[in-house]
Image (cartoon, rainbow, N blue to C red):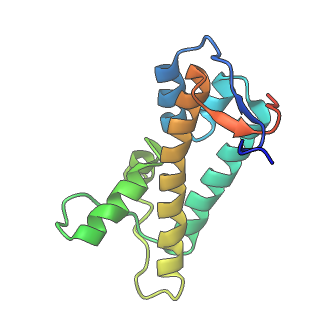
Amino acid sequence: MSSESPAACEVEPTGKSPLLAAGLAFILPGLGHLYLGWRRRGVLYMVILLFMYCFGLALHGSLSRPGSGAFLATLGTIGDLGIGPLYFVIMKLGHGVGRVAAATHEIGNAFHWSAGVMNMLLVLDAHDIATGAKTCSGPVVRE
């Protein structure tokens, strides 16, 4: 019996800028993957994360604002900021105020915080794909 793990593979470096891929992924979820040529995955990430963020706001979740001083509020703000410039666009348009009395308020918060945190992971994923540092099990399929 072999002590080796299942067949692992490494993604070849793309020759594209890792910093640009990460930056694009931060600007809009999935955009970094689109830049790298991972079209299906990029579109899927974009649709899922934008849906989660907007659905959280539709459930009367309120965007966290910097400077409240409370530890958990700071974590919520970091999660919200993870979606990138969309946070500031929504704030500028006057959305994201939420309604604390709504039964769905906390669920809405969980949705948009989670979308922000997942986008932070996608930024790292796009960077790793561009540098070839990403490993996987099974064959690599570039979409």
Position of 41 with respect to 74 (left or right) is right
Which quadrant of the figure has residue 125?
top right
Answer whether residue 143 is visible to the viewer in this image: no
In the image, farthest residue toward the front: 1
Q: Quadrant of the C terminus?
A: top right
Image vertical order of residue 137 relative to residue 115, above or below:
above
Residue 36 placement (x, y as % from top left): 66, 23
Name the residue furthest top: 15
Residue nearest the observer in this picture, 95 or 67: 67
Q: Is residue 72 above or below residue 43?
A: below
Position of 72 compared to 37: left or right? Answer: left
In percent of the image, x 61 and y 52: which residue is there? 50
**Image quadrant in which you'd find residue 16:** top right
User: Who's the residue at 83% across and 33% down the image?
Assistant: 139
Whole-percent x and y of residue 69?
A: 16, 66
Among the 4 quarters of the image, the one containing residue 98? bottom left
Specify whether residue 135 is in view: yes
Name the residue located 53 percent from the left edge and 29 percent from the top edge: 127
Q: Position of residue 94 (x, y in %)?
A: 40, 58
Residue toward you, 101 or 139? 139
Question: Residue 61: image x %, image y %?
Answer: 47, 72
**Count of numbered marks:** 0
Q: Residue at x 68, y 25 (%)?
A: 11
Q: Is residue 70 left or right of residue 123?
A: left
